[in-house]
Amino acid sequence: MTTYVYGIAAAAHPALPDGMDGIGDPAQKVRVLRRDGLAALVSDSPDDLRPKRRDLLAHRSVLDEAGAGGPVLPMRFGSLAQDDDAVLAVLDDRCEHYEERLRALEGKAEYNVKAAHDEQAVLHQVLADSPELRAMVEANQRAGGGSYEQKLRLGEQVTAAVRAREAGDGAEVRRALEPHADSVSAGPDGSGWLANVSFLVSRDRADGFVAAVEELRRDHPHLELRVHGPLPPYSFVDPGPARPADDPAGVG
């Protein structure tokens, strides 16, 4: 049966959740595969694995349980290997790389910050900052709303100003929070957010990071900020060198 991989930790990790429920219905039991100084948290995988809410939560729960006792390299949901032997082979091949990443992530967690504009608030701000746009609005109002061409030109100018503000505010989110993190990873473009950034934060600096987010909220009330964390450091797990195309493991 195909082996499902939740994450990789040190073999001496004190809280590896051997025997807890994992993905699947009925739930598959989590087991620990050890090879030298490393351990992989795995279970059997159902044939019809899909990203259902129950399985997503089970994946996260296993990593949360393990991560409470020490660093874990989290695998993305759906990480599969042909069998247990294939997982152990990957631990052999990438032993030095995984051990280095575990040391780098010791005592750290990921915080993901997404930012968007409050549309009405940012429109007011854009108009307040641009005498030219205010003059166009006032001229249109005096003309009973303005002609089609005037409305179109005003709309284009406002859109351009809002987009420029999005770029500036996205950079400001990163600038304000980056000093409180050990590393930063930008999320994919085109996500619908003006900022989608993950921060790797030492646990002893977490209070300062959260305080910086709250200060950002106070200083920029036109921003809507969503913070998720502490999370397993998904965005900071470097998988290491690519394996050959015929690699049967598919892990990392």
Image: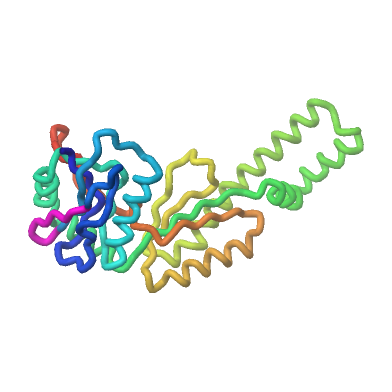
14 up-or-down from 149: above or below:
below
Q: Which quadrant of the structure image shows residue 188?
A: top left
Q: Going by the image, does 89 lie left or right of 103?
A: left
Q: Residue at (33%, 37%) from the top-left corner?
A: 50
- In the rendered image, residue 37 lying in the magenta stretch gets the answer yes
Q: How was this image coloured? A: rainbow
Q: Residue at (22%, 51%) from the top-left corner?
A: 29
Please tell me which residue lies in front, 213 or 172.
Answer: 213
Q: How many marks?
A: 0
Taking the view exactly as shown, the residue that stands out farthest to the front is 26
Q: Residue at (62%, 49%) from the top-left corner?
A: 117
**Quarter of the image where the N terminus is located:** top left
Q: Going by the image, does 50 lie left or right of 18?
A: right
Q: Residue at (84%, 27%) from the top-left corner?
A: 147
94 up-or-down from 219: above or below:
above
Taking the view exactly as shown, the residue that stands out farthest to the top is 148
Please tell me which residue lies in front, 211 or 70.
Answer: 70
Residue 35 position, x and y percent, is: 9, 56
| Boundaries of the magenta span | 30-38
Most frequent secondary structure within the magenta stretch: strand
Residue 99 position, x and y percent, is: 17, 60
176 up-or-down from 26: above or below:
below
Residue 74 position, x and y percent, is: 28, 53
Q: Which quadrant of the structure image shows residue 95?
A: bottom left
- In the rendered image, residue 119 lying in the magenta stretch gets the answer no
